[in-house]
Amino acid sequence: MVEILFLIGLAVAIFVGFNVGGSNTGVAFGPAVGSNTISKVGAASLMSICALVGGWTVGRNVINTMGGEIVPSRFFTLEASIAILFFIGLALFLSNIVGVPASTSMTGVGTIAGLGLATDALNVGVMGRIVSWWLVSPVIAFWVSAVIGRYWYPTLLDWFAITQTKGTLVQIDRSGGLVRPTLGPNTTMREFIGTLLVIIVGCYTAFSAGASNMANAIAPLVGSGAIEMNYGILIAGSAIAVGAFTIARRTLDTMGSELTDMPLLAALIVALVSSTLITVLSELGIPASIVIVSTMSIVGLGWGRATRVKEYTRRSTMIEEGPLGISGGALAVDSADTPTIKQTKSEENHHSSTSELDKNHHPDINSLYEPWTTARVIAMQNIVPGISTVSAYLVFEFVPIFG
């Protein structure tokens, strides 16, 4: 009987890992895929490797927190572990079906908290610390990104404008009897370095996602002693890889093109801000939400850029109506922007100086972030953990086999 329960628990853990891969691949590589920087297959491959590395290293701290600190490990019986993993997997599966990447960490912690509430074993201090960071980290991500979008984005464009040109990024040169990679026919070194940075930062995000979310698939089984941590990480990493290659395609589209019209530079900023926050919290053992932090970083950056556009419009109108006849383009918010994910321009966008641009070059305010899509994503990210928490509490409280 114990062997059968273990196999069931293992199957459910794999199901959870599968959905973790589906949910978090979109967060890590959605912008890169949406801008045609990397293919979906390439994104899935990098997600599989980087998430495993993150879970194997920093992720151990989060596994320990979820496997024995929120609720003592003695309460993680095989039956309880199976129920916890089932609720996590079901909630994430439903969110992936509708194409909205749910908060894996909030779903997992909420389900474990349901067990703790039903058994009067919830560690309120640990739970309070986790919830506090849940509230603080999205605010930090929003305002850091908003400040960058409002005040530093034009300067960063001057330094790191990333363009996309026609043709392949690199090609194989077989002349001279030596096979070596070279830049494509239209590729500049700046384009190559910028594109490489987008991919590297996506890998960094995948690393942080694995560090934070690997625990959701295996922490209950590790806490119950049913499986050793190293084996659990390998199993969960394999399941994440399967999810990245399959169900992640829908969330890649959502995070890559529906939430905001994001230039490649913006993708770099969002990934760096959110991944750094999540990696730091994972090192502290806090199972934080890479999905919510990334979403709020996207919204913050778009909102910051939008406020700059509004300020430019107000000031340029005053100048145009004034007696000096100064061109409104002198107060341009951004110089010619880099390719956006929705536009995926094939021709090279030449980066001009601010004083040479007309205000018509600026992005439309409504294109910088999509309020309705944003509201849908944020709502789902809070509804899904709520459903799993309440469902887990009811099962552990009233179903004798799990009591």
Image (cartoon, rainbow, N blue to C red):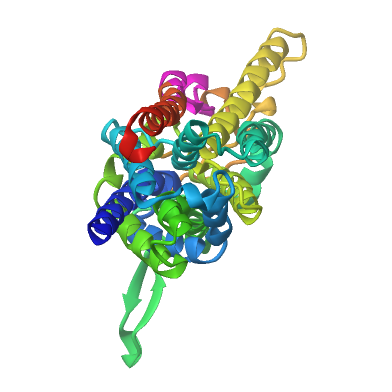
* Residue 170 falls within the magenta-colored stretch: no
Q: Is residue 309 above or below residue 158?
A: above
State the quadrant of the C terminus. top left
**Measuring 37% from the left and 65% from the top, which residue is drawn there?**
185
Residue 371 seen in the figure? yes
Q: Is residue 130 above or below residue 304?
A: below
The overriding secondary structure of the stretch rendered in magenta is helix
The image position of residue 324, as x and y in percent, is 77, 14
Which sits in the foreground, 116 or 351?
116
**Measuring 28% from the left and 30% from the top, which residue is drawn there?**
98
Residue 347 seen in the figure? no
The image quadrant that residue 397 belongs to is top left
* Residue 366 falls within the magenta-colored stretch: yes
Tell which residue pokes out farthest to the right in this image: 324
Which sits in the foreground, 88 or 25?
88
Which region shows up in magenta?
Answer: 361-375
Which sits in the foreground, 397 or 195?
397
